[in-house]
Amino acid sequence: MRKLEFLGKGGFAAVFKVSYEGHILALKQVSKTANYKSSSDVNAAKNEIKVHNSIISSYDSVKASCKNPKVIEYGYDNICKLLYNNSDNKDIWLGFELGGHTLNKLCFNIKGSFNGGARI
């Protein structure tokens, strides 16, 4: 895996654009260092994996039994797929399809100027 660029930092992870086995991924790096914040970050990462897997299995079940092509057409294709996950002693790594914009940029119109992560 090769890091190509830093994309940003979200609520519980740093995100990098990476090259992995011929694919370009958005790789979330979640720290497992021993403090309260990282413990909640680790739980958030584990929950993200569970929710993602639940969505996939639910959608696959509906798709297999559904005769309505509209349900299939608008289902899972609109979700960035989790293609890679791993962990070591220091970090949890989640590799997703690289999408267009961050969820924050799509949901919120943030006004003002920022310096070092703080509004000025």
Image (spheres, rainbow, N blue to C red):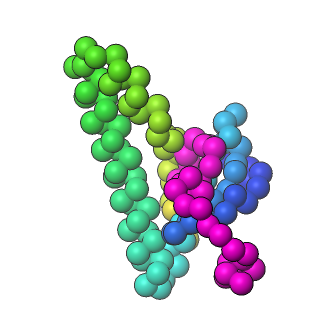
**Image quadrant of residue 75?**
top left
Q: Which residue is nearer to you in this view: 119 or 41?
A: 119
Q: Which residue is nearer to you in this view: 15 or 71?
A: 71
Query: Residue sitting at 51 percent across and 62 percent down?
Result: 92
Query: Residue sitting at 73 percent across and 75 percent down?
Result: 113
Query: How far across and how far down the image is residue 46, in percent?
Result: 39, 60
Magenta region includes residue 114:
yes
Q: How many marks?
A: 0
Please identify the residue farthest to the left as the structure is shown.
65
Q: Which residue is nearer to you in this view: 39 or 10?
A: 10
> Quarter of the image containing the C terminus?
bottom right
- Depicted 92 relative to depicted 1: above or below: below
- Depicted 42 relative to depicted 64: above or below: below
Relative to 93, 68 lies left or right: left
Q: Judge whether residue 91 can be spotted in this image.
A: no
Relative to 25, 44 lies left or right: left
Tell me which segment is drawn in magenta: 93-120
**Image quadrant of residue 22?**
top right
Relative to 62, 75 lies left or right: right
Q: Judge whether residue 120 can be spotted in this image.
A: yes
Query: How far across and how far down the image is residue 3, in percent?
Result: 74, 53
- Depicted 17 relative to depicted 78: above or below: below
**Image quadrant of residue 69?**
top left
Query: Residue sitting at 51 percent across and 69 percent down?
Result: 12
Magenta region includes residue 30:
no
Query: How far across and how far down the image is residue 112, in percent?
Result: 69, 74
